[in-house]
């Protein structure tokens, strides 16, 4: 894995929760919230959890939250490309539209990871063809190649291990056809995982932006 | 279609397609933009009509026109946008045309903010438009209930020839839930749209869509006719849920997101040995007044909980008719309260009683 990771995917596929979990688990230095599409549920809302883990958060909020959905980003988003040895994760907005922001990084020639989060239960990424179509759309708008897949197949509280395995079967086909590795399988902590062969690195997820009451 | 994971706004859009929408007219505003975004793709692909109008005022008047021509029409907006539509909504109700309006509430007044709120209760149930008219107002609490309600509301609007308003807050619009789009809805008899302006090939003589009655006798008759219809809606369509109502110590009244928070609070209070029930209005108009007759005398009081400053409280006071102490809990501005705050409000009930 390259030290600079961009997280992309269909909107509502779980990018932000995965960014937060991965950044905290693997001790990243920075999380950069580039979501200028969603008004709620953005990684900047987890500023406390990130601060506790000593992870720097960069978003379009300068020094305090604005609670706005303004289409601007902080110039500090370039920091990981200008300094050496910084481990950073960028949380992009959904779809090819959100991935368009990668064009802002065209002047840098460092290698990056562009990981595609997929949940088979999102109707727009429910089969191989739709996922490949989304990969093409994201590569077209971002000007970058997708470098890996993340299986985040889930129905929130109702998720079973069988659901995630069904997602794995489809992602293996995408992986084979697009020559892309499955980098992570994401499993929420309430789902038992013993004795199952997951593709890639197993990321146990604790939802951070979802309230206890829904 | 089995279970899928959907965002509230997206689910509203797909449910409209399942409910048989012919045309959508709207104007962007946060936090409901995913509704027009989704419909712009899928309505056009299905050979139906999608128009992003030049303003909310234009959009609601396009709804008026298309509903007059017999189409199944929807518009959606958020608080200040719904405020702009009020004149058109009154005209549509006056002309007795069916349509579906989705209001995804954000904080107010004025431009307010973009975080979730329930501060448009008055706007929905009392209306900002002129005249004696009513909307049928649904306030679902989950995305599943929103889908089921929306699918049915096109039929309800057609049956009564009246606008139906679906009132949710920004959180329901933006959150994700696993849902099923194929739950069956109640079959209703839908009369032929003999009022529609579809050309004289389709009906004898001219059809005129109108809310203008210069003659006071005629206008009074029209109003009496509307009131008769509203009474029928009250009799047939009032919907609510009662939870935990066996000898409750207290009763919470809450709708939408607030009722979900209250459900958690009720469980927490039960652990402390305090038995709390809930009346959850599903229709905000007609308001489920009769539900309050089932609160026993022994109940120590009613807590009205809102993400607004005491709007539904009026209906709670009217419905209880002075039989119990009524207290109020509200957060506003985009703040979504935690269940612990409701627990605290029940524990300190007397301090919150409305004088």
Image: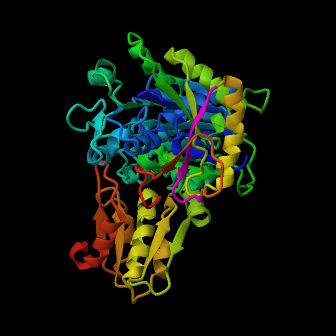
Q: Is residue A34 visible?
A: no
Q: Is residue A6 above or below residue B74?
A: above
Q: Farthest residue to the top: give it.
A: A107
Name the residue at 39% across, 35% down. Answer: B84
Residue B65 spot, x, y in % from top left: 58, 30
Instruction: Find residue A131 and report its image quarter.
Output: top right
Residue B261 spot, x, y in % from top left: 41, 63
Q: Quadrant of the C terminus of chain B?
A: bottom left
Name the residue at 68% across, 38% down. Answer: B195
**Residue A57 appears left or right of A113:** left
Name the residue at 51% across, 14% down. Answer: A143
Q: Farthest residue to the bottom: give it.
A: B298
**Residue A172 appears left or right of B97:** right
Q: Is residue B127 visible?
A: yes
Instruction: Find residue A84 and report its image quarter.
Output: top left
Nearer to the camera, A131 or B184:
A131
Please tell me whether residue A188 belongs to the stretch shown in magenta: yes
Q: Is residue B338 above or below residue B197?
A: below
Nearer to the camera, B116 or A134:
A134
Residue A154 spot, x, y in % from top left: 59, 48
**Residue B262 appears left or right of A175:** left
Number of numbered discs present? 0
Please tell me whether residue B304 belongs to the stretch shown in magenta: no
Residue A86 spot, x, y in % from top left: 32, 28
Residue range in magenta is A180-192
Q: Is residue B344 above or below residue B213?
A: below
Nearer to the camera, A34 or B175:
A34
Scheme of image coloration: rainbow
């Amino acid at each position: 894995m390259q030290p600079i990771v961009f997280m992309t995917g269909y909107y509502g596929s779980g990018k932000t929760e995965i960014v937060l979990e991965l950044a905290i688990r693997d001790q990243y230095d920075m999380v950069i919230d580039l979501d200028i599409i969603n008004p709620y549920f953005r990684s900047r809302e987890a500023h406390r959890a990130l601060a506790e883990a000593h992870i720097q958060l960069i978003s379009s909020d300068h020094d305090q939250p604005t609670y706005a959905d303004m289409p601007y980003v902080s110039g500090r988003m370039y920091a990981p490309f200008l300094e050496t040895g910084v481990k950073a994760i960028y949380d992009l907005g959904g779809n090819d539209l959100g991935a368009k922001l990668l064009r802002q990084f065209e002047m840098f020639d460092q290698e990056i990871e562009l990981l595609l989060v997929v949940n088979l239960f999102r109707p727009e990424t429910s089969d191989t063809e739709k996922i490949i179509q989304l990969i093409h759309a994201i590569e077209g708008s971002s000007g970058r190649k997708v470098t890996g897949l993340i299986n985040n197949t889930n129905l929130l509280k109702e998720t079973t291990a069988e659901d995630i395995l069904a997602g794995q079967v489809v992602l293996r086909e995408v992986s084979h056809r697009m020559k892309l590795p499955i980098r992570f399988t994401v499993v929420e902590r309430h789902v038992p995982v013993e004795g199952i062969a997951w593709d890639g690195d197993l990321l146990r997820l604790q939802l951070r932006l979802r309230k206890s009451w829904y | 279609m089995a279970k899928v994971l959907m965002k509230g706004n997206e689910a509203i859009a797909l449910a409209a397609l399942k409910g048989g929408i012919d045309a959508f007219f709207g104007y962007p505003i946060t936090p409901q933009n995913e509704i027009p975004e989704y419909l712009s793709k899928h309505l056009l692909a299905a050979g139906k009509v999608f128009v992003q109008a030049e303003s909310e005022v234009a959009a609601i008047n396009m709804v008026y026109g298309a509903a007059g021509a017999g189409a199944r029409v929807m518009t959606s907006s958020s608080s200040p946008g719904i405020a702009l539509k009020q004149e058109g909504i009154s005209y549509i109700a006056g002309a007795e045309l069916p349509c579906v309006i989705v209001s995804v509430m954000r904080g107010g007044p004025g431009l307010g903010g973009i975080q979730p709120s329930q501060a448009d209760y008055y706007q929905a149930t009392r209306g900002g438009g002129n005249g004696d008219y009513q909307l049928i107002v649904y306030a679902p609490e989950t995305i599943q209930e929103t889908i089921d309600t929306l699918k049915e509301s096109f039929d309800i609007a057609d049956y009564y020839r009246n606008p139906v308003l679906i009132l949710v807050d920004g959180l329901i619009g933006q959150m994700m839930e696993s849902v099923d789009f194929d739950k069956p809805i109640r079959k209703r008899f839908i009369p032929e749209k003999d009022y529609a302006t579809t050309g004289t090939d389709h009906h004898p003589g001219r059809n005129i869509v109108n809310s203008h009655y210069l003659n006071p006798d005629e206008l009074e008759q029209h109003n009496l006719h509307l009131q008769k219809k509203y009474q029928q809606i009250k009799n047939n369509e009032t919907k609510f849920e009662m939870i935990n109502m066996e000898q409750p110590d207290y009763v919470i009244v809450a709708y939408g997101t607030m009722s979900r928070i209250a459900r958690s609070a009720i469980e927490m209070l039960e652990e402390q040995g305090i038995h709390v029930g809930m009346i959850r209005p599903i229709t905000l108009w007609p308001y489920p007044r009769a539900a309050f007759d089932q609160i026993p005398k022994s109940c120590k009081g009613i807590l009205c909980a809102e993400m607004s400053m005491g709007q539904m409280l009026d209906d709670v006071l009217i419905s209880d008719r002075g039989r119990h102490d009524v207290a109020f809990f509200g957060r506003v501005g985009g703040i979504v309260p935690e269940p612990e705050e409701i627990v605290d409000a029940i524990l300190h009930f007397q301090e919150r009683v409305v004088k």
